[in-house]
Image (tube, helix red, strand yellow):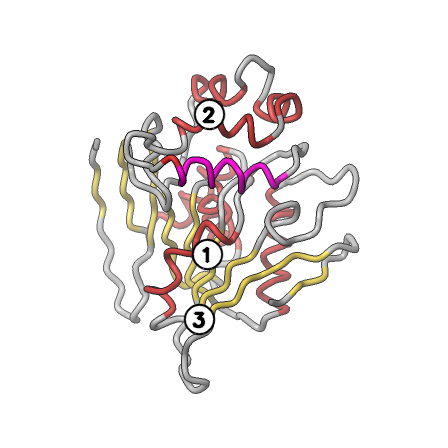
Amino acid sequence: MPRIALPEGVSIHCAVDDFLWPWDRSTPVLMMHGFARNATFWNRWVPGIGETHRVYRPDLLGCGLSDQPPKGYRYTPDKISAQILAVLEALSLPRVHWVGESSGGIIGLLLAATYPDRIASLVLCNTPSRIPDQIKRTYALDHASASDAMRTYGVGEWCRRTLGYRLDQERASPDLCDWVVHEMDRTPPVDCIGPTEDACGDAAKRTARTALRIWARGQSAAAGALRPYRFGILARVDLEGQRRWADASTDG
C-alpha cells in the first residue's frame, strides 16, 4: 500500500482498494476515519463502493499504519488538511468523493470549503456541527479535557469508559465493542486541536448551497449509533453525475 512522505520527515499510509478495469474512470472515493480510528473502520463499506469506484483510505499521522507524529506535533485543521492534500497530490487524485465519519467528516467539510474543486461530493456520517459543553465534560471524564483523560487512562480505557457515546451497546455485539476499543487503543494520546466549531460553522456556510442537510438524533454510523448528540450530516449527492439537493430535518 502507498506511503506518502510529509515535510515533517514522517509518512502516512493509505489503503487503496481497486477492483475496476484499468479503463474505468469513475471519480474515486476517499474515506476518512474519525478521531483515534483508522482505515480498517471502513472495511465493511469497501465491497459495495468498490464495485463502481476506486477507494482510498488514508490513516492520519499517529493512526493505523501511519508513522507517529514528531515530538511536539500538534494537530490543527491546517496540518490535517496538509496531510490529505499530500495524499491527493502523491496519488494523482485531482478530485474525489469524500466519505467521512465523525471528525473525518469535519475534515471533509473544511476541505470542501477551502478547495471546492478537489471535493466532488460530501457524505458525512455522524459528523457533529456543534459539540455541547455537556458532551465535552462527558468525554473529559474527571479531567480538564478529553486529551488529559486519554493521557491518564490511555486511549483504549478512555474509549471503553465513553463507549456508550460512540456505539449503541444495545445493538453492537461484544466482539464489535472490544474491537473498537482495541483499534482505538493503538493510537497514542496526543496534544490535539481538532477542527474547531467556528471553523466548521464557517465551512458549512460556504458549502450550504451545494449540500444535503440532514439533522438527526441517534443517527447510525459505520459501527453503530452515537445517541446523545444532535448531528449535522451534510452530503452533496453527485456519485453518478446527477445532482439532487434536498433539505430535511428529523429527530430520531
| Residue 36 lies in the magenta-colored region | no
Residue ID at (28%, 37%): 215
| Image position of 81 (left or right of 31) | right
Which callout, 3 or 1, points at the residue further toward the start of the chain?
A: 1
Label 3 with label 2: CB-CB less than 8 Å? no
How far apart are the alpha carbons under marks 3 and 1? 11 Å
Q: Nearer the viewer, residue 196 or 162?
A: 162
Residue 118 badge: none
Residue range of the region highlighted in magenta in the rendering = 175-187
Where disc 3 sits, the SS reads: loop
Which callout, 1 or 2, points at the residue further toward the start of the chain?
A: 1
Residue ID at (70%, 38%): 74
Residue 162 badge: 2
Q: Which residue is mark 3?
A: 54
- Examine the rendered structure and indicate whether residue 156 appears above or below residue 99: above
Where disc 2 sits, the SS reads: loop
Please, what is the three-letter code of the amino acid marked with disc 3?
A: Arg
Q: Nearer the viewer, residue 222 or 26?
A: 222
Label 3 crowd (10 A; few <14 / some 14-19 / many >=20) = many
Please, what is the three-letter code of the amino acid marked with disc 2?
A: Thr
Numbered marks: total: 3
Where disc 1 sits, the SS reads: strand
Which residue is outermost to the bottom? 23
| Residue 179 lies in the magenta-colored region | yes
| Residue 226 x/y as whole percent | 35, 33
Q: Nearer the viewer, residue 131 or 224?
A: 224
| Residue 90 x/y as whole percent | 63, 69
Which callout, 3 or 2, points at the residue further toward the start of the chain?
A: 3
Mark 3 or 2: in front is 2
Q: Which residue is mark 1?
A: 31
| Image position of 233 (left or right of 190) | left
